[in-house]
Amino acid sequence: MHPVEVKSALESMVCLVDTREQDTPRLRERLKEIGCPWERKKLNFGDYSVKCDAIDLSETIAVERKMDLDELCNCYCKERKRFEREFERAKQAGAKVYLLIEDGSWEDAYSGKYRSQMSPESLVASIQAWLARYNCQVIFCRQHTTGKLIHDILYRELKEALEKHEPDSGEDQGPC
């Protein structure tokens, strides 16, 4: 796409929020922090994705948000099969997933600074297995940064996709 078309398409950016994300005061605050229009949509994987007038990236880009290391531990223990299926769907679609973990860090994971009974070795091994198996990026952040970070990740992915995007060739291009 031409840079002017990219700029115009970016102005129509809409954050897609999975319908399974619970409607809580924190979600509403996060959506304000994201700072662009949003709509609910059942996503095949992840909690957030993006679309605009030109393209929908919900099958290629996702942000999976976890509120802390305890929730992530639960996903790797009690919910492991469901969590694996979600990431397998993303992998089969050739999608890139950002695993965004609030209020945690590699240091916390390695030192066991969380409430779960999962050992630090098992947690770190599980996170690293996800990095190796899936087209996944792990990002740690503070809760108050989450909305802005989700916006910026989705904006950048949308911009990159638009710059590579070829508009439909059905229009008359005039004489060659």
Image (cartoon, grey):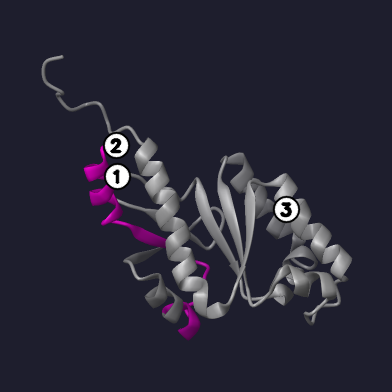
Cα separation between marks 2 and 3: 34 Å
The location of residue 34, given as percent across then percent down, is 40, 70
The disc, 3 or 1, on the residue closer to the chain's N-terminal end is 1
Between circles 2 and 3, the one closer to the viewer is 2
- Tell me the quadrant of the picture where the N terminus can be found: top left
Please give the range of residues in magenta: 1-28
Q: Amino acid at mark 1?
A: Ala
The residue indicated by pointer 1 is 54
Between circles 1 and 2, the one closer to the viewer is 2
The location of residue 132, given as percent across then percent down, is 74, 47
Q: Amino acid at mark 2?
A: Met
Position of 21 with respect to 55 (left or right) is right
- Which residue is at the far top? 176
Note whether residue 22 is visible: no
- Classify 124 as above or below 68: above
Callouts 2 and 3 close, C-beta under 8 Å: no
The disc, 1 or 2, on the residue closer to the chain's N-terminal end is 2
How many other residues sit within 10 Å of disc 3, few (<14), some (14-19) or many (≥20)? some
Q: Quadrant of residue 66?
A: bottom right
The residue indicated by pointer 3 is 130
Q: Residue at x 28, y 34 (%)?
A: 167
The residue indicated by pointer 2 is 1
Callouts 1 and 2 close, C-beta under 8 Å: yes
Could you say which disc has been placed on residue 21 in the image?
none
Q: Identify the secondary structure beneath mark 3.
A: helix
Q: Residue at x 86, y 77 (%)?
A: 117
Q: Residue 41: say if magenta.
A: no
Cα separation between marks 1 and 2: 10 Å
Q: Amino acid at mark 3?
A: Trp
Q: Identify the secondary structure beneath mark 2.
A: loop
- Classify 85 as above or below 139: above
